Amino acid sequence: MLRDLVLKNRSYRRFYQDTAIEMKTLRELVDLARLSASGANLQPLKYILSNDPLKNEAIFKDLAWAGYLKDWAGPCEGEKPSAYIIILGDTEIRSSGGCDHGIAAQTIMLGAAEKGLGGCMIGAIKRENLRKKLNLPERYEILLVLAIGKPRETVVLETVTEDGDIKYWRDSNDVHHVPKRPLDEIIISEL
C-alpha cells in the first residue's frame, strides 16, 4: 500500500556503511525517476551514480547533515551512505530546475524504501567544490544529492506540539523524532 511505503520512507542519516548497494539497484531507482512526470515533458534531469567507497567519501565531504542537530556533524565512519545519486539539471534543456528534481527525488526514495533501503535528500551542498571534484561541465546544475543505504537508525513521526516547534530531534536512545503538522492544520478549505 502506498501509505505504508510513504511512512517507511523517512530521511535517514545513518546507515550500515558496509552494506553495498549495487550499481544495478541505483540504475533501477533512476529508471523510476525517468518514467515519472516532467514539466512540459522536457526531461532536463541527468544523474551521477556512485557506489564506490572512495568516491563516496569525496562526495560526503561536500555535504551538510541535519541542520537542526547542532551538536551532530553527520554520520561517523561505519554509518555513512553506501551510495549516492546526484541529481543534475541540464541548463541547455531548461534554464531552471523547476519541480522535476523534487518529483524525481521522491520517486527514487520511494523506490529505495520498497527495496528495504533508505536515504536522505540533501540540498546543503558545497556545489562548486563538488562540481570541481566531478569535473562537471557548466551546463549541469547540481540540484540535490541523494544519500542511499541500509538505514541504521529509527525515525518516528509525531504531531507538532502546541508550541508549534517543527524541528526534528534525537532522544537519549538516539531515536530520531520528526514532528508533523496535523492534517486539519494544513487543509485550509474543503470546497
Image (cartoon, rainbow, N blue to C red):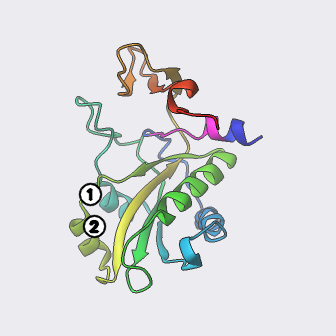
Identified at 41% across, 69% down, the residue is 97
Residue 59 placement, left or right of 101: left
Residue reaching furthest to the right: 1
Specify few, some or many for label 1: CA neighbours under 10 Å numbering under 14, 14-19, or 20 or more: some
The residue under label 1 is which amino acid type? Answer: Asp
Secondary structure at numbered mark 2? helix
Q: In this picture, is 101 found above or below 132?
A: above
Specify few, some or many for label 2: CA neighbours under 10 Å numbering under 14, 14-19, or 20 or more: some
Question: Residue 102 in the image: x percent, y percent?
Answer: 49, 57
Residue 41 placement, left or right of 11: right
Disc 1 versus disc 2: distance between alpha carbons? Answer: 6 Å
Q: Quadrant of the N terminus?
A: top right
Q: Mark 2 points at which residue?
A: 130
Of label 1 and label 2, which has the lower sequence position? 1
Secondary structure at numbered mark 1? loop
Q: In this picture, is 45 found above or below 110?
A: below
Cβ atoms under marks 1 and 2 closer than 8 Å = yes
Q: Give the range drawn in magenta.
A: 6-12
Identified at 33% across, 38% down, the residue is 66
Question: Residue 65 in the image: x percent, y percent?
Answer: 32, 43
Q: Does the magenta stretch include residue 7?
A: yes
Identified at 29% across, 30% down, the residue is 69
Residue reaching furthest to the front: 191
Residue closest to the eye, 91 or 54: 91
Picture quadrant of residue 77: top left
Q: Name the residue under label 1.
A: 62
Residue 64 placement, left or right of 40: left
Q: Is residue 128 magenta?
A: no
Question: Residue 30 in the image: x percent, y percent?
Answer: 59, 67
The residue under label 2 is which amino acid type? Answer: Leu
